[in-house]
């Protein structure tokens, strides 16, 4: 039943995205939300933005409906009986009280996604400037961390946990935002990472996190049908920041280390770093280059991994598939990391560094004459 529910949830999100993207495309053209060729993007014709709004709605609407139903059913539950209507399977009804208890946290997280989408739309319509956007991102994610009590490394203590949680959210939001520099990149990388997180969450029985990840998988898969090279619509900052936000939040909510499971290792907490190694490396490398050249690290350019691959003669589709494969290698390694013996963990670390080394080599060489 859980597998069937996951499949239906994914198909629902994908179907909503497929229906909403054409509407978002038409509205984007009317509103002037169109990306012109040039700058840091590698496209050749004016392309509508606002695809991210369609993806957000495909995630937001099912979440809100689920939260509303869970609260209503839990409030009207009869003592000693399962909550919810009789037509729902018992394996689902048993989790309704838990959904209701987590409703406030879920609403705060969804509000953060909506706020980032609005910020991204404003930036897509008229660039806000890198520092204004960064301040807006930080304010939004800090509010979510404090209000939803969303923390990582709580053993470090309250102040440090809050700071690290905020930094992680901002870092991943911007990593996926920076990755959105070529057709299909941000959506494809998010899809791969979300599938890996889904495997990790489902494997340890985190059904609520898995449900959210099914929605993210469906939304990004549906959007890729429009965004894979040659793209007919872009997600814009309104989409890339939201996707990065959901990846960051859900990677924080996923459990990688559980002392009750002997197969789980403490170094499993490093799984998110392995999972997102490619976008994090790409972000860190381009920011290092910009700082070295005494330029603003937050202003886009054509120094990303994808741009280097294009300079080496690859087509847009070849670039997308190359980045997907690199991400898939680290994503699979991240899922395995909490469950392998110590010696294999060192092999996974070496494999991840090897993938990043290949990327570094490709970035540092010019196209052959």
Image (cartoon, rainbow, N blue to C red):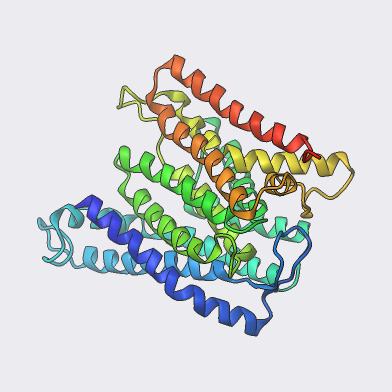
Q: Quadrant of residue 125?
A: bottom right
Residue 175 spot, x, y in % from top left: 64, 48
Residue pictured at 69% horizontal, 80% vertical:
32
Residue 155 spot, x, y in % from top left: 50, 30
Q: Quadrant of residue 104?
A: bottom left
Residue pictured at 52% horizontal, 67% vertical:
226
Residue 9 spot, x, y in % from top left: 32, 60
Residue 263 spot, x, y in % from top left: 33, 23
Front-lying residue, 152 or 271: 271
- Residue sitting at the far right: 294
- Quadrant of the frame with the C terminus: top right
- Residue sitting at the far bottom: 30
Specify whether residue 186 is in view.
yes
Q: Where 40 falls versus 29 (above or below)?
A: above
Q: How many marks are shown on the rendered structure? A: 0
Residue pictured at 77% horizontal, 47% vertical:
303
Specify whether residue 105 is in view.
no
Residue pictured at 57% horizontal, 82% vertical:
26
Front-lying residue, 331 or 58: 331
Q: Is residue 176 left or right of residue 71?
A: right
Front-lying residue, 37 or 274: 37
- Residue sitting at the far top: 343
């Amino acid at each position: 039943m859980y597998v069937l529910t996951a499949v239906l949830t994914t198909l629902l999100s994908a179907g909503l995205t497929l229906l909403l993207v054409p509407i978002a495309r038409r509205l984007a053209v009317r509103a002037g939300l169109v990306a012109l060729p040039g700058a840091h993007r590698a496209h050749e014709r004016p392309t509508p933005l606002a695809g991210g709004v369609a993806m957000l709605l495909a995630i937001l609407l099912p979440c809100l409906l689920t939260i509303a139903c869970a609260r209503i059913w839990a409030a009207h539950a009869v003592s000693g009986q399962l909550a919810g209507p009789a037509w729902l399977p018992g394996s689902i009804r048993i989790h309704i009280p838990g959904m209701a208890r987590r409703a406030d946290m879920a609403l705060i997280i969804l509000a953060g996604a909506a706020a980032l989408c609005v910020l991204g739309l404003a930036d897509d319509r008229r660039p806000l400037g890198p520092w204004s956007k960064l301040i807006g991102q930080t304010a939004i994610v800090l509010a979510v961390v404090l209000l939803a009590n969303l923390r990582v490394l709580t053993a470090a203590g309250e102040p440090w946990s809050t700071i690290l949680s905020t930094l992680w959210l901002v870092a991943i939001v911007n990593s996926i935002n920076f990755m959105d520099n070529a057709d299909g990149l941000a959506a494809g990388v998010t899809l791969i990472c979300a599938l890996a997180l889904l495997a990790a969450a489902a494997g340890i029985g985190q059904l609520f996190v898995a449900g959210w990840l099914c929605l993210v998988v469906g939304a990004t898969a549906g959007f890729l049908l429009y965004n894979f090279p040659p793209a007919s619509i872009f997600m814009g900052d309104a989409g890339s920041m939201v996707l990065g936000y959901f990846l960051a939040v859900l990677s924080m909510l996923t459990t990688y280390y559980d002392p009750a499971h002997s197969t789980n290792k403490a170094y499993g907490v490093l799984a998110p770093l392995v999972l997102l190694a490619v976008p994090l490396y790409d972000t860190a490398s381009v920011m290092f280059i910009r700082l070295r050249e005494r330029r603003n690290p937050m202003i886009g350019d054509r120094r990303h991994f994808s741009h280097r691959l294009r300079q080496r003669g690859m087509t847009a589709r070849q670039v997308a598939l190359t980045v997907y494969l690199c991400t898939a290698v680290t994503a699979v390694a991240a899922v395995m990391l909490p469950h392998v013996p110590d010696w294999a963990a060192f092999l996974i670390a070496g494999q991840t560094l090897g993938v990043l080394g290949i990327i570094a080599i490709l970035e540092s060489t010019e196209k052959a004459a």
